[in-house]
Image (cartoon, grey):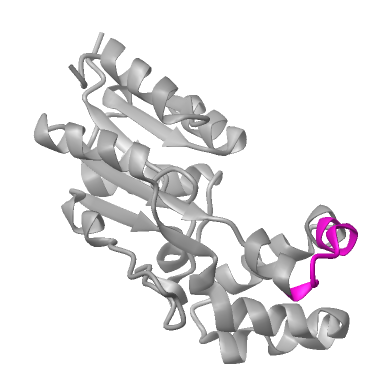
Amino acid sequence: MNRRDVVIFDLGNVLIDFDPRRVYREFYKGDEVALQHFFDSRAMWDILNHGHDTLDSWDVAFDDLKAKRPDLSKEIDLFCRDWFKFILGPIPSTLGIFNQLLDNKVKLYALTNWPSQVWPPQTHPESEVLHDYSFLDKFDDIVVSGQEQLRKPAPELYQLALERWQVDPQRCIFVDDLPENVEAANRLGILGHHFTSAEKLAKELTEHGLLV
């Protein structure tokens, strides 16, 4: 049985704080019913996926969606204008785990659902805090879904990553906050970890001898 000695990280809500609700809550002026409807109706995720599934600039890419959904025109404009307000820097607890793994010479990769138009992450110009994303340079490699025109949980994206990195899935631990992405990894022989807290992640990595 192979030792699990390769760690693959998702980024959003694992290593990077990602929460569009904060921005849309301000847009809806605190109307929690309207905000919840926007997310429950999948409108937000339709916008996100539409922006993700193209290599065109968003100025061009969203013209057809606006034509189909004129009721979402302002929400789409906000999405394009304020994407970088959705992210608020690295999550300290998991960044600490990442740095420990780095110190322990563990092979580290990232597999992220992230639109190519806004990669790599950066601080929004209006932010009062300068967020440091330099840790991304320390990965052995990062596969960005938007650049590949595939999204998790599509098995083809995982297979593309494994082939590019030349790693055996039986050696890998994959950390993601979405159960469907974890399940897709498990089906390929990767050990998926559904991320809910840094403490639980550290415990599992310690059990595999990757943290001391």
Residue 35 located within the stretch drawn in magenta: yes
Q: Vertical placement of 148 versus 65: above or below?
A: above
Residue 116 located within the stretch drawn in magenta: no
Task: Pick the residue in front: 27 or 102.
Answer: 27
Task: Pick the residue in front: 36 or 153.
Answer: 36
Q: Quadrant of the C terminus?
A: top left
- The quarter holding residue 143 reads bottom left
The image shows residue 64 at horizontal and vertical percentages of 74, 86
Q: Image point 45% across, 49% down: which residue?
A: 157
The image shows residue 41 at horizontal and vertical percentages of 85, 57
Predominant SS of the magenta segment:
helix
The image shows residue 185 at horizontal and vertical percentages of 47, 32
Q: Is residue 170 visible?
A: yes
Q: Image point 23% across, 35% down: which residue?
A: 167
Q: Vertical placement of 64 versus 2: above or below?
A: below
Q: How many marks?
A: 0
The image shows residue 89 at horizontal and vertical percentages of 39, 59
- The quarter holding residue 124 reads bottom left
Q: Vertical placement of 56 versus 30: above or below?
A: below
Task: Pick the residue in front: 34 or 12.
Answer: 34
Q: Is residue 8 left or right of residue 156?
A: left
Over which residues does the magenta segment extend?
27-36
Q: Vertical placement of 54 versus 138: above or below?
A: below
Q: Quadrant of the N terminus?
A: top left
Q: Image point 42% across, 83% down: which residue?
A: 125
